[in-house]
Structures are given as structure tokens and as C-alpha cells.
């Protein structure tokens, strides 16, 4: 059997299993090279396109090219390429085997909607390396309530969320940088690692499109494969709407003992012109925060409160407070409930003021936007969250990656040195329908 016939045979087997309606697998060993397949291995040719019928393949209209043929080999691309595989929701440990016989490799790996998993993996020609990370994937279904009981059976997604990669039934990985190289992928579901659930608004959510980026989708870069980050934040959300939209129900349906819930709200809760979701800082705001705290504790999880980052509004060289008493309300609630507090309000002020009014613009998504961040700004704020985890001596700190260096927001990394490549824009399925739209609310 020649190599082309071998690829075809393996692909047909994979397609036939899916076509028969079998339950989706939760473990795969994909190989992208020309060597003969071994038992349990799925060969993938560069022209294998993802479809629901096949259950795996290159996605979003991208197509890689073959690296050097020989005993080993894989795929590469002059631009980022995406690979997807249908999987049930849950946490997955992914090992990517990287390398090229003929050239040096530089590979950045992102998952789902631009979650940074591997910042830059470099190897010389002929050298290979493996990188491992954990990815959380989910769908919008909620376990239906019993007959005559109130509730619903799905998260109430808004228009902006239609078609995004973080609410579908597959895992999608993006391979980019100057010379991405992919030889193989090992994917397996892991149910025994802690999950860090994120609840918040647009400053936390997985933003689908460049340039807007949030700290939640950068936080993944700083943790080992022994913990998963599950970002359930969404643009425009408030404490009230997070509950009424069944987003909290979704988290609670997945939460287990030993998990974490990081809670950051305030930007939208303060809007008096949103009467259905407005809360007062020292009364109803506290009360709703305590609901999330109590629900997490009831399931044996650890709640952590995060004060909202300030907006980029300078009076001279100093940041002007535009969040009213909401940060102080969070601080008081943390003290009253004996909950760990990450004071992102203070750290963000230190960060912006260290850059100054002009250079601070580089931390934001552009134009007149003083709320939403660039990839650089989100990366630095994610480091602030890591510092908060370390300062609180949370057990979660033991999962911080070994190459993390202590960070002082008053002495941030220079924006000119930030080199995480942007993700492609305008791809079908990469961020909803139609043209690029700004974030809804905060």
C-alpha cells in the first residue's frame, strides 16, 4: 500500500465511524507525517478538511503545506492554520509535536477563540520538541430542570456569540508564527484536574477577533497542563444577567470540588441607564456577589473576587476613577466573606500610570476605546491576575508555569517587546457572522 492509499484508507475509517452515529471519541493520536500509521494512530493529510461528517481536519478555510519528506515530517504554513476535532465538552490535555527536518521552527499555539496556550516554541532544523497544555471546551447546553421546575436547558447566548469557536462542539487549535511546524497531536480528556472558571464581562471574555483581547484568554499561557481555564465571561454581562442568562447555571453544572471561580464585574453593573441590571455598590452589588460566592462554596469550589480594572482616563499623569465605589464594594465583600481578593483596580492603575498617557494607548484596542485591551495589555493584566494568585497563596499557584517571572505592574514589560502574533481575521466561524463588530457593552 503506498502512502497516498494509506492516508485515504485511514480517513475513510474515521469518516465511517462518525457517519454511523458513534459517540464522539475523547482521545486521539493524530499524525501529520508520511511515515506508516501505527496502531491507534490517525493519519492526517494536508488537504484533509474538517467537516461534521469526518469529525476532524484543517478548518476555517486554512490549508497547510507538507514539511520535508523523510522518516519524519509534518505540516507547516506561511500563514496560521487551524485544526479542529469534534469532542464532547470537558477538559482536554493536548500534546503537540513540533519540528521540521529542513528548517528551524517558531510556533505559537492558540485554542478556541484566541486563547494563548504556547507563546513561542522554537527549534532548530532537524530538532523536535513537544509542548503540552490543557484546554477547556464547552457547549451551550444546560441540564434541563425536572418537570414543573423553573429554569432552562441552554445558556441565553447573544447575537455576538453566534458561530464563535468557544461555544461549538469541537476543539479548534491555531498554529501560527513565522514558521509553525506540526508533526502530531495527542488529545485526551482529563476529568481529574482542577478547573478555573471565569465569570465576568468583555474585559475578561474570550474576544473572538483582533485586536480586542482580554486577560481571560491570556491567562491560559501561565498555567501548566494540570489545570484548565474555563472562560465563561461575556461582553455586556452584569452580575444579574450572568444569573438570569443561565451562565452561572452552566458553570455550576460543571463545577466540582476543588475548582475555582474567579469573579470580576463592575463595568456594566454601574450603568444606571441599564435599569434591569443596575446594582448599587454597597447593597445589591454585594448581595449578588455573595450569591456567586455561596453557590461556589456549596459545591466545594473556591471563590476569588477580582476588582475591575480601571479605564484609561488620565487627569494629567494620573488615572481618574470611573468605577465609583464598585471596587471598594468588592474589597468589602471579600473581607466580609473571607474570600481571597485580587485588586486588579489598583494594579491596573499602576500599570497605566507606569506607561503614561501616550504609551498606555498601546495597551488598548485602539481609537477612542478606553476600556478594552490589546493583546499586550491583556497579557500584562493576566500577569496581574497571576500575581494576585501568588499573593493570596492559593493552592492554584502551584500550577503556574516554571518560566513565569515575578511581575510588578508598576514596571511593566515594554510594549515594543511584545511579539505574540495576531490571529487571522475574517475567517468563517472565527468570530460570529458578518463583518467585524465592536464588543457589546463592556
Image (cartoon, rainbow, N blue to C red):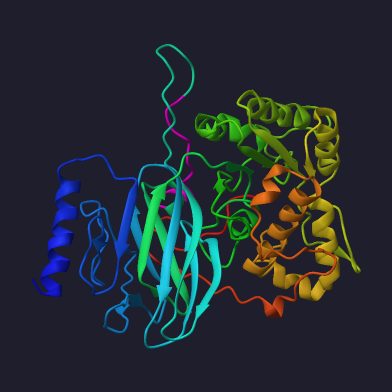
Q: Is residue 282 above or below residue 418?
A: above
Q: Is residue 157 magenta?
A: yes
The percent position of residue 286, horizontal first and vertical second, equals: 78, 30
Q: Main secondary structure of the magenta part?
A: loop
Q: Is residue 49 above or below residue 387?
A: below
Q: Quadrant of residue 296?
A: top right
Q: Nearer the viewer, residue 39 or 437?
A: 39
The percent position of residue 46, horizontal first and vertical second, equals: 26, 72
Q: Residue at x 71, y 73 (%)?
A: 362
Q: Nearer the viewer, residue 333 or 158?
A: 333
Q: Quadrant of residue 300?
A: top right
Stretch of the chain drawn in magenta = 152-164
Q: Nearer the viewer, residue 145 or 174?
A: 174
Q: Residue at x 49, y 52 (%)?
A: 135
The residue positioned farthest toward the top in the image shown: 148
Q: Residue at x 67, y 45 (%)?
A: 396
Does the image show residue 428? no
The percent position of residue 99, horizontal first and vertical second, equals: 41, 77
Q: Is residue 278 above or below residue 41?
A: above
Does the image show residue 155? yes
Q: Residue at x 34, y 45 (%)?
A: 26
Amino acid at each position: 500500500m503506498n502512502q497516498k492509499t494509506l492516508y485515504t484508507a485511514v480517513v475513510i475509517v474515521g469518516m465511517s465511524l462518525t457517519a454511523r452515529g458513534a459517540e464522539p471519541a475523547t482521545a486521539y493520536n493524530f499524525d501529520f507525517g508520511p511515515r506508516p500509521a501505527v496502531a491507534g494512530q490517525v493519519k492526517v493529510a494536508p488537504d484533509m478538511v474538517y467537516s461534521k461528517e469526518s469529525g476532524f481536519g484543517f478548518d476555517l478555510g486554512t490549508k497547510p503545506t507538507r514539511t520535508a519528506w523523510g522518516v519524519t515530517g509534518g505540516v507547516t504554513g506561511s500563514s496560521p492554520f487551524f485544526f479542529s476535532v469534534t469532542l464532547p465538552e470537558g477538559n482536554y490535555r493536548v500534546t503537540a509535536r513540533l519540528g521540521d527536518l529542513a528548517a528551524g521552527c517558531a510556533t505559537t499555539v492558540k485554542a478556541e477563540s484566541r486563547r494563548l496556550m504556547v507563546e513561542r516554541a522554537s527549534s532548530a532544523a532537524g530538532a523536535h520538541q513537544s509542548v503540552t497544555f490543557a484546554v477547556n471546551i464547552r457547549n451551550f447546553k444546560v441540564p434541563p430542570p425536572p418537570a414543573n421546575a423553573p429554569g432552562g436547558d441552554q445558556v441565553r447566548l447573544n447575537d455576538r456569540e453566534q458561530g464563535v469557536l468557544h461555544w461549538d462542539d469541537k476543539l479548534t487549535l491555531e498554529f501560527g508564527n513565522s514558521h509553525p511546524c506540526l508533526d502530531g497531536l495527542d488529545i485526551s480528556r482529563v476529568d481529574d484536574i482542577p478547573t478555573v472558571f471565569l465569570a465576568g464581562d468583555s474585559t475578561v471574555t474570550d474576544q473572538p477577533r483582533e485586536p480586542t483581547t482580554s486577560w481571560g484568554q491570556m491567562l491560559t499561557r501561565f498555567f501548566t497542563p494540570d489545570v484548565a481555564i474555563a472562560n465563561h465571561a461575556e461582553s455586556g454581562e452584569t452580575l444579574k444577567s450572568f444569573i438570569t442568562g443561565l451562565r452561572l447555571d452552566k458553570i455550576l453544572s460543571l463545577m466540582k470540588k476543588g475548582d475555582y471561580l474567579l469573579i470580576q464585574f463592575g463595568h456594566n453593573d454601574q450603568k444606571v441607564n441599564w435599569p434591569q441590571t443596575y446594582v448599587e455598590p454597597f447593597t445589591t452589588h454585594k448581595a449578588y456577589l455573595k450569591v456567586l460566592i455561596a453557590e461556589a462554596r456549596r459545591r466545594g469550589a473556591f471563590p476569588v473576587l477580582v476588582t475591575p480594572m480601571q479605564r484609561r482616563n488620565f487627569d494629567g499623569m494620573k488615572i481618574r476613577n470611573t468605577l465609583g465605589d464598585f471596587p471598594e464594594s468588592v474589597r468589602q465583600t471579600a473581607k466580609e466573606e473571607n474570600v481571597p481578593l485580587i485588586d486588579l483596580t489598583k494594579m491596573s492603575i499602576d500599570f497605566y500610570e507606569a506607561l503614561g498617557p501616550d504609551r498606555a494607548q498601546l495597551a488598548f484596542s485602539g481609537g477612542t476605546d478606553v476600556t478594552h485591551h490589546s493583546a499586550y495589555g491583556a497579557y500584562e493584566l493576566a500577569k496581574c491576575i497571576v500575581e494576585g494568585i501568588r499573593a493570596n497563596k492559593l493552592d492554584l499557584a502551584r500550577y503556574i508555569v516554571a518560566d513565569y517571572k515575578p511581575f510588578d505592574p508598576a514596571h511593566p514589560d515594554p510594549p515594543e517587546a511584545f511579539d505574540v502574533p495576531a490571529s487571522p481575521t475574517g475567517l468563517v466561524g472565527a468570530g460570529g457572522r458578518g463583518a467585524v463588530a465592536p464588543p457589546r457593552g463592556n
